[in-house]
Amino acid sequence: MAYLSKDYFCQGYTLLYMKHTKIAELLKSTDFDKEVTVNGWVRSRRGGKSVAFIAVNDGSTIHTIQVVTEIAKFSEETLKGVTTGACISATGKLVKSQGQGQSVEIQAEKISVLGAADVETYPLQKKGHTLEFLRDIAHLRPRTNTFGAILRLRHHISFAIHTFFNDRGFFYLHTPIITGSDAEGAGEMFHVTNLDLEKLPKTSDGKIDFEKDFFGKQTNLTVSGQLEGELGAMGVGLVYTFGPTFRAENSNTPRHLAEFWMIEPEMAFHEINDNMDVAESMLKSVISYVLEICKDDLAFLCEHYDKELLNRLNMVANATFKRITYTEAIDILEKSGKKFEFLVKWGIDMQREHENFLVEHFNVPVIVTNYPKDIKAFYMKQNDDGKTVRGMDVLFPYVGEIIGGSQREDNYDKLLTRMKEMNIPEKEMWWYLETRKFGTCPHSGFGLGLERLVLFITGMTNVRDVIPFPRTPKNAEF
Ligand code: 4AD
Ligand code: MG
């Protein structure tokens, strides 16, 4: 398995580009007096006439390495280019640091400026910037401590999710991004077309003639991979999707994106309780993983943004989630004596304030099940009471709904009736209905919004700050 070994990749880098070592590795090294090369971006430069101290970061860790530079050894031209934001390559001896705050430093013998940064116009200065300001310079924000930490965490969270499912025998299923169906039945979809919008072809009754469109029918960007996920589960048992999801809902809130990433497991032979077990253990497993792997980044975010962050993550990783029915939830809200802004009565779609109250009430994540059928999607399994369906939402402290899922209706007649009642075009969904005609079985699944989880884990307060390039109403820059 040499081709998969770590060495292979390290050598690969050497061949590709000048030999250099990642700062994350240098800071752990005790190989003193060895000549090393570091490549990265200058965070700051200080010092006097004889020595300059250059703090360099390459994104492999939140920490910088100090490059100690004797001014006399270098040309004025070179040193002029070593300013905040410039990209440099420095070679020299790795030595035990004299100063405080770092274990090792590099005594520079050679410095080259790979890319200068104009001092007058480079927008990132050493003083902190607001998150709002950084959103406007999303092309540069990966170079900040905050976004470096968030991007690394986002990677490790994604990796932990793949690992969780892979370890349990799930198969990663790639569901389509362009789709002809509206999985959630909510109609909040972006159209996909290559028709000339200035000259739309019309049918004899004046409607747009989608037969002339690229796919010969009306198509959209997917709002969920679930329906196709179910098709996969009905053959290979356990699947999950992990892909971009698009919703044209005009909700300009700190929790909604028009383009977000969703993880959707779909499991044959799983009922609603099994579904909850998988959701709970996945969330705890991912949080435990990052607590172990991303200590420095989490410590930084805890210190600078949210002093309670680590406590909250540890609490959830070790909690037993509270499971209650929707009816019980409404009862708790009604008896709370609290004045809510939005009316509480059986049948409402719970608002953020209601979800928050429940989580605070139990002081652990809450899973609510058995929702009124009228506020949930057509595919959820109907209970015998004729009023509720086997849906489940996982509510988290701080972010509210993090997961939505359900056991699926596996009875052909009940599913068809519900589709008719909810005006879901059954003709277009023939393939979905057929799974209930040919070898149907009890099955369940859920959708985890990646950004909501990253929000919870990083302690950020706006989803725009946990995805590299957010897409929201009136905003598709970068
Ligand atoms: O509750 P939702 O709409 O459920 C579904 O889409 C199901 N098809 C999932 C399934 O059963 N396979 O969305 C699932 C999760 C939400 O709980 C939330 O975390 C996230 O996706 N989400 C969003 N995240 C960011 N921006 C948005 N606009 C989101 N809409 C949903
Ligand atoms: Mg939902």
Image (cartoon, rainbow, N blue to C red):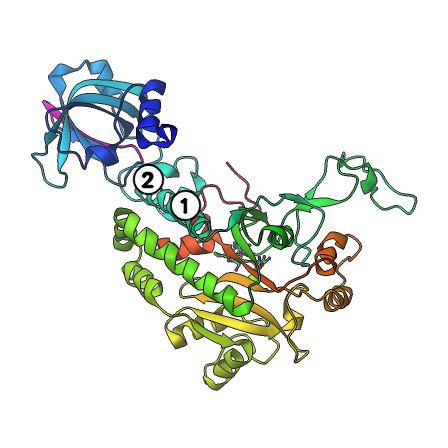
The mark that comes first in sequence, 1 or 2, is 2
The picture places residue 230, in percent across and down from the top left corner, at 62, 55
Tell me if 17 is positioned left or right of 203 in this view: left
* Foreground disc of the pair 1, 2: 1
Query: Callout 1: helix, strand or loop?
Result: helix
Question: Is residue 51 located in the magenta-colored stretch of the structure?
Answer: yes
- Say left or right for 304 vs 71: right
Q: Position of residue 54 (x, y in %)?
A: 19, 29
Q: Nearer the viewer, residue 61 or 257?
A: 61
Is residue 325 at least partly visible in the picture? yes
Look at mark 1 in the image and give the residue it sits on: 159
Tell me if I can see residue 224 in this picture. Answer: no
Please say if 213 is above or below 415: above
Left or right, 113 with reference to 251: left
Q: 476 left or right of 54?
A: right
- Disc 2: which residue: 144
The front one of 392 and 84 is 392
Does the beta carbon of the residue at mark 2 sit less than 8 Å from ligand 1? no
Range of magenta residues: 48-59
191 or 462: which is nearer to us?
Answer: 191
Name the residue rendered at 13%, 29% in the picture.
31
As helix, strand or loop, the secondary structure at mark 2 comes to loop
Q: The residue under label 1 is which amino acid type?
A: Phe
Question: Could you tell me which residue is drawn at 73 percent across and 35 percent down?
Answer: 194
Quote the CA–CA distance across marks 1 and 2. 22 Å
